[in-house]
Amino acid sequence: MHARVIPLSAPNLQTGLREACSQCNLRELCLPMGLSGGELDQIDQLVEVRRRIQRGQHLYRGGDDFLAIYAIKTGFFKTDVLLEDGRDQVTGFQMAGEILGMDGIGSEKHTCNAVALEDSEVCVIPFVDLENYSREISALQHHFHKMMSREIVRDHGVMMLLGVMRAEERLAAFLLNLSQRFTARGYSPTEFNLRMTRNEIGSYLGLKLETVSRAFSRFHEEGLISVHQKHIQIRDAAGLKKLLSERRA
């Protein structure tokens, strides 16, 4: 089933972008500060359509031609790759205000799958147009490079997470990272719903499902968090951070 594509008229497009960017860490890409009105009008044209992706649908699959990057307006996604043994390896979780699709820049083919974990909406930014506008507007190119740098730093963070941390440290880092990302979007830093399953969390953190469940149970018993199905309440953020500081010490 194909995702639904919603073309937007020019007035609605600009209004929608400004509304989305007000809570999106991509606002510097979509509406860079300090640009002239004419330059802003040019950048507004980058987003030609929005796509609504229903829960469980693919935004793109590994091997698809790379044509665009996608700014998540609403919703939540996971990216994963198919391993040789047939298992899916989760490589990341992305929420509103973040981007998808940069895995395809180097080879011009997507190297992973992007799947909606809930009903979502993305803004489609054709990469050819983005490159063209970046050559004309130096500030846009600078902001795009910053965005790519954030992705590289995030990937390095995951490598460190999987390389040196014990299971409970990995889960603590994961929950604190989600808390920070929700805070940046104006949501509660201490209460949120997990859009992903524990099996998907385990895949991302390099842990077995049973190990993830035990770590959640221990955190709950020690009063670090409260867990009710997918609802998480962080009751002792300092305690979670202490687990990580002990590793650094």
Image (spheres, rainbow, N blue to C red):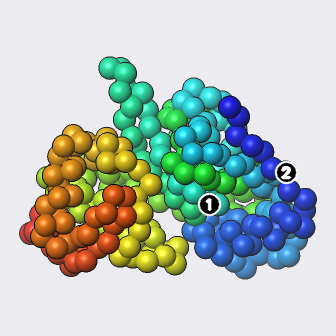
Q: Is residue 143 visible?
A: no
For residue 216, the mark is none
How would you rate the neighbour count of disc 1 (Cα within 10 Å): few for under 14, some for 14-19, many for 20 or more? some
Question: Disc 2 to disc 1, how far (Cα)?
Answer: 17 Å
Which three-letter amino acid code belongs to the residue tagged 1? Thr
Q: Nearer the viewer, residue 132 or 16?
A: 16
Q: Secondary structure at mark 1?
A: strand
Residue that carries the numbered disc 1 in the rendered image: 74
The structure residue drawn at horizontal position 13% and vertical position 61%, both measured from the top left corner, is 218
How would you rate the neighbour count of disc 2 (Cα within 10 Å): few for under 14, some for 14-19, many for 20 or more? few
Q: Is residue 12 visible?
A: yes
Which three-letter amino acid code belongs to the residue tagged 2? Pro
The structure residue drawn at horizontal position 21% and vertical position 40%, both measured from the top left corner, is 208
Residue 110 drawn at (x, y percent): 57, 33
Q: Secondary structure at mark 2?
A: strand
Horizontally, residue 39 falls left or right of residue 152, namely right
Horizontally, residue 86 falls left or right of residue 186, namely left
Residue 97 drawn at (x, y percent): 58, 63
Horizontally, residue 249 falls left or right of residue 183, namely left
Residue that carries the numbered disc 2 in the rendered image: 7
Rendered image quadrant of residue 224 = bottom left
The structure residue drawn at horizontal position 36% and vertical position 44%, both measured from the top left corner, is 200
**Residue 168, above or below 240:** above
Horizontally, residue 101 falls left or right of residue 242, namely right
Q: Nearer the viewer, residue 132 or 65?
A: 65
Residue 241 drawn at (x, y percent): 21, 72
Q: Are marks 2 and 1 in contact (CB under 8 Å)?
A: no
* Total numbered labels placed on residues in the image: 2
Residue 53 drawn at (x, y percent): 65, 46
| Image quarter of the C terminus | bottom left
The structure residue drawn at horizontal position 28% and vertical position 64%, both measured from the top left corner, is 227
Q: Nearer the viewer, residue 150 or 10?
A: 10
